[in-house]
Amino acid sequence: MRPDPGLAIQEAVIAGMGAQARGDERLRLAARGKLLAWQQVDAMAPASELERAEFLLRRLYPTLPERSLQQVLAQLAEAGAAGSWHGFQRPEPLKAR
Amino acid sequence: MRAVFDALERLGVRYFVTGSVAASVHGVLRQSHDTDVVLVDAGRFGELAAALRESCVIADPIAYGGFSMASIIEQGTADKVDVIVAPSGAFEASAMERRQRAEVPGLGQVWVASVEDLVLAKLVWSEGTSELQLRDCAQLIRLNTATLDRPYLERWAERLGVSGFLSAVES
């Protein structure tokens, strides 16, 4: 494998965090990524909640197979038409650490 | 996505979390937006899907060679759990027996793959070419070297045909 300078330091810091802190950090990274995805989707000015959902799911889950994505969107459209889905909830801004 | 785990536990479906979430439990941190869960009882997936129909949208399992994978997305948050329905082979049975209970931030108490089974799964998924997976394996082995069940790891690496990949990540 290609040598990665600083990997040993990075590994030691992450390992030293403990499982709880690592899990918290994983959540924080995911939340930050999700906020960025929402900002990108907002910039695209989607015309509907369904279009927003499609943009968001494509950003968050780029490897989700197209067939699965279309199935999910069809179910969201159905739930929207039935009045049981009004769009994904916007995440809260991250708290400063 | 606690709803998925509540449903699995309520239905008595045996599962374990793998992938980046399990890696974070065992020492490796990776950014990921989804959670990977392994089931071996394909017949129970329908029950799980039915239990989650009110709160989630669910894409049917897609077959990928020896396993299939379905995606569950929460209608409120857009959070995703990928459910990997694995074949009920000897390795999967062993991994299910060796799973560990762990407290995972964001999920609560869940069953998680053991570090040895996580390494073995990553070696298989990597097909020897995914640098990220192989790097994770090397890191997981280094970080857990004091407690690693090496005979188990080597025995299953041989049986799964990934001994060469295991040697490569340890070199």
Image (spheres, coloured by chain):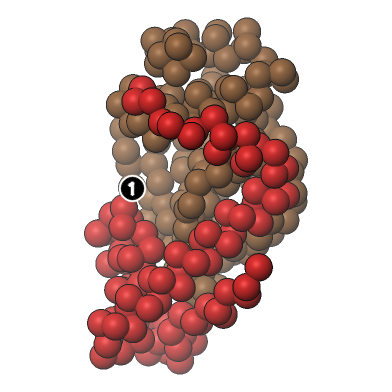
Chain colours: A red, B brown
Identify the residue shown where x is 26% and y is 59%.
Answer: A67
- Seen in the image, is A66 located left or right of residue A60? left
Q: From the top left corner, tell me how far across and down residue A63 is, in percent.
A: 31, 53
Name the residue at 30% across, 89% down: A48
Q: Please indicate, yes or no, whether residue B16 appears anywhere in the rendered image.
A: no
The image shows residue B162, relative to residue A34, as above or below, that is: above
Q: Residues within 10 Å of mark 1 (few under 14, many from 20)?
A: some
In this view, B58 is above or below B20:
below
Foreground residue, A21 or B21? A21
Q: Nearer the viewer, residue B117 or A30?
A: A30
Q: Could you say where residue A38 lies in the image, as x and y percent from the top left?
A: 40, 76
Q: How many dots with numbers?
A: 1
Q: Name the amino acid, label 1.
A: Ile
For residue B77, side relative to residue B68 (left or right): right
Relative placement, left or right, of B9 versus B139 is right
Q: Position of residue A34 (x, y in %)?
A: 46, 68
Q: Quadrant of the C terminus of chain B?
A: top left
User: Residue A27 sits in which quadrant?
Assistant: bottom right
Indicate the position of residue B150 as horizontal and vertical percent values: 63, 11
Secondary structure state at the residue bearing disc 1: strand
Q: Residue at x 49, y 33 (%)?
A: A7
Q: Which residue is mark 1?
A: B62
Please state which of residues A77 and A55 is positioned toward the viewer in this rendering: A55
Residue located 25% across and 82% down the image: A44
**In-image side of A8 versus A88 (left or right):** right
Q: Quadrant of the N terminus of chain B?
A: bottom right
Tell me the subunit letter for badge 1.
B
